Each structure stands twice: as C-alpha cells, then as structure tokens.
Amino acid sequence: MSNETDTAPHEAPAPAGGAPGFDPVLHPAFCAALNHKLRTPLNAIIGFAELAALQAAGRQRDSDLQQILKSAREMLQIIESDLGQPLPVPPKREAAPVTERTCDVLYVEDDLVNFTLVERILEFRPGLKILHAARGQMGVEMAISCQPRLMLLDLNLPDMHGSDVLCLMQRNAVTEQIPVVILSADATPSQIERLLTAGAKNYLTKPFDIEPFLAVVDEYVPVSSHRAAA
C-alpha cells in the first residue's frame, strides 16, 4: 500500500519567516508591492489604536488596545525583516521662513482614512489648521494660495506621483520655501533617498507612531504659533 507522503513532490525548506521555497531576493518587485500593500492598512490599525489607547489610559480597555498595538507592531517587524531593508536616516534640514499663510498643514493624500487619522492626531495640537487635497495638482494649487507652514505628501496619488508634486513645489518661487514631508507606505531605501535628495525635508513610512510624527510636525509648525491663533 503506497503512502501519500512517499509520492508527494519534495518541497524546498522554507526560509526563516518566509513561504516554502520563496526567496525575497529573487522577487524584489513583488516584495516591494506587497510591502506597500501591507503597510497601508497597518497605518490605520496602529494609528487609530494609538489614539484610542491614549484616550483610554487608566481604563480596562487600555490593555486590550495595547495588545492590538503589540500584535500590529510585531506584524510590521515581520514585514520589515522579510520584505524590507534598513531605512536610511533622513538628514536634518532647515526650513526657510514663510511670510503669509492661511493654514498650518496641508496634507496631500487620496485615502480619506489616512487623512482622517492625521486630522485626529493633530487634535493634540489645539488651534492647528489642516487642509486636505486629494490630488497632486490640487495640492500644488492649494499650497500656492494657502501658504501652509508644512505640506504632508503621499506618493501614490490619482493624477501624478508625489515626486512630481515635490518637483513642482521646488520649481515655483511661491512654494519652494514650504517644507515637504513625505508620508508613504513605500519603504524602499532607494525611493527614500531619491525623495530626500530631491528636496523633501523628511520621509516617514506608514505605519508611523504618533509621538515621532508630532515631533516632525512641531519642527516645522511650532506649538506656540497655533496656540496663539486658537
């Protein structure tokens, strides 16, 4: 009597943390795409869980939220170890002063969930005014008219890539002094280096933690400025 295990095809041993016989080095495009797709929902999971945990501090449900955060961050570590590479540290850059403005932060992002998350996080900065642009061209036009202290920029936009938005901002004398910080699920080191070289002040990969994000915002939008306006 034959045994199914004797006739089953031999399967290559699985690399640590990966699928059987799958070598991420041989499939860089697939890994980059999967990395991006997984980071996008994790951004919302970690971000909103952090917000809820901050609001629930000292209550019973806080422990449940901390477990959600712990599990989500463990998943992020798997993504970074199996699908990603160590990220370069962005250089510190100084922002030139802006003379006139009608908002503090302009977020160019087509995903409403991502915008809502950032909007909620910035509630920790009372008086700070944030505006939303869902397309790249709209973002450039709003930057010209509103003169924000800071632009937060996604890369995968419906009408153009975020790098093109950055280029348009850099080429226009009216917007070239506005600091641009990239918020993207694209954690490819070469992409990060390219955007920083092109003039981005910082590059935060999704998902990001609240405190480091607020530290970046505070660097370009001093707390005293929007508290005075509140």
Image: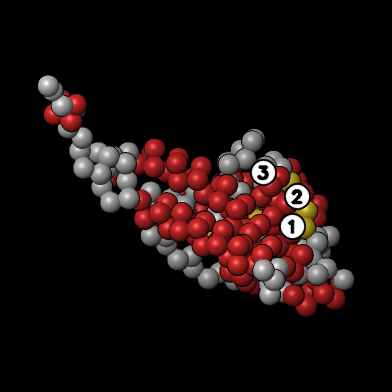
Using the rendered view, name the quadrant where residue 225 is placed: bottom right
57 in relation to 67, above or below: below
Asked if the residue under mark 2 is in contact with the one under mark 3, i.e. CB atoms within 8 Å, the reply is no
Query: What percent of the width, then of the height, locates residue 27?
Result: 32, 38
Q: Which one is in front in this view, the residue at disc 3 or the one at disc 2?
A: 3
97 relative to 19 in the view: left or right: right
Query: What percent of the width, then of the height, locates residue 175?
Result: 70, 56
Any part of residue 197 in sight:
no
Q: Residue at x 45, y 58 (%)?
A: 74
Q: Please give the residue where the numbered disc 2 appears in the rendered image.
A: 132
25 relative to 99 in the view: left or right: left
Query: What percent of the width, then of the height, locates residue 109?
Result: 67, 47
Please state which amino acid type lies under the numbered disc 2: His
Q: Please give the residue where the numbered disc 1 appears in the rendered image.
A: 119
Q: Residue at x 58, y 65 (%)?
A: 66
The number of numbered discs placed on residues in the rendered structure image is 3
Please state which amino acid type lies under the numbered disc 3: Asp
Using the rendered view, name the quadrant where residue 150 is placed: bottom right
Image quadrant holding the N terminus, namely top left
Of mark 3 and mark 2, the one earlier in the sequence is 3
78 relative to 108 in the view: left or right: left
Kindly report the distance in space between the C-alpha atoms of the residues bearing marks 3 and 1: 12 Å
Any part of residue 82 in sight:
yes
Nearer the observer, 110 or 141: 110
Using the rendered view, name the quadrant where residue 137 is placed: top right
Of mark 1 and mark 2, the one earlier in the sequence is 1
Kindly report the distance in space between the C-alpha atoms of the residues bearing marks 1 and 2: 9 Å
Q: Secondary structure at mark 2?
A: strand
Nearer the observer, 141 or 59: 59
Q: Which one is in front in this view, the residue at disc 1 or the one at disc 2?
A: 1
Q: Please give the residue where the numbered disc 3 appears in the rendered image.
A: 111
